[in-house]
Amino acid sequence: MPARPPGNEAGSFNPLASSEVKDAIHRALLTGQDQRWQAGPWSGYAVPSRQTMANGCRTIRYTVDQRPDAPATTINACDANKP
């Protein structure tokens, strides 16, 4: 089992409060490609759905490497520049 980052308890990292995770989600939304993110000692992926919905949104699944037993979290991300 991988070691937790020093000084960080398992529940102390909120991915959606991290600009690095939000940036990776945005890149995944725009490119349709998996995006690696790193926020200090934390890391993971933002993985977009293959299809973009008619409204310009995609389902994005994001993971945290340091939480291998936690299920991936899924959100809907939308491009604010699309009408």
Image: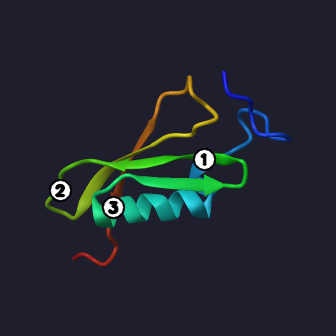
Give left or right: position of 70 versus 35: right
- Let me know if residue 78 appears in the view: no
> How many marks can you see?
3
Residue 29, numbered label: 3
Is residue 69 placed above or below 40 in the rendered structure?
Answer: above
Q: Nearer the viewer, mark 2 or mark 3?
A: 3
Q: Quadrant of the N terminus?
A: top right
Task: Name the foreground residue: 83 vs 50.
Answer: 50
- Earlier residue among tags 1 and 2: 1
Is residue 42 placed above or below 67 in the rendered structure?
Answer: below
Position in image of residue 9 (x %, y %):
78, 34
Contact between labelled residues 2 and 1, with CB atoms less than 8 Å apart: no
Q: Which residue is mark 1?
A: 43
The structure residue drawn at horizontal position 34% and vertical position 73%, both measured from the top left corner, is 80
Marks 2 and 3, how far apart at CA:
11 Å
| Amino acid type shown at disc 1 | Ser
Q: Which residue is mark 2?
A: 53
Q: Residue furthest front?
A: 2
Sort mark 3 into few (<14), some (14-19) or many (20+) by Cα contacts within 10 Å. many
Residue 72, numbered label: none
Q: Quadrant of residue 56?
A: bottom left
- Earlier residue among tags 2 and 3: 3
Q: Secondary structure at mark 3?
A: helix
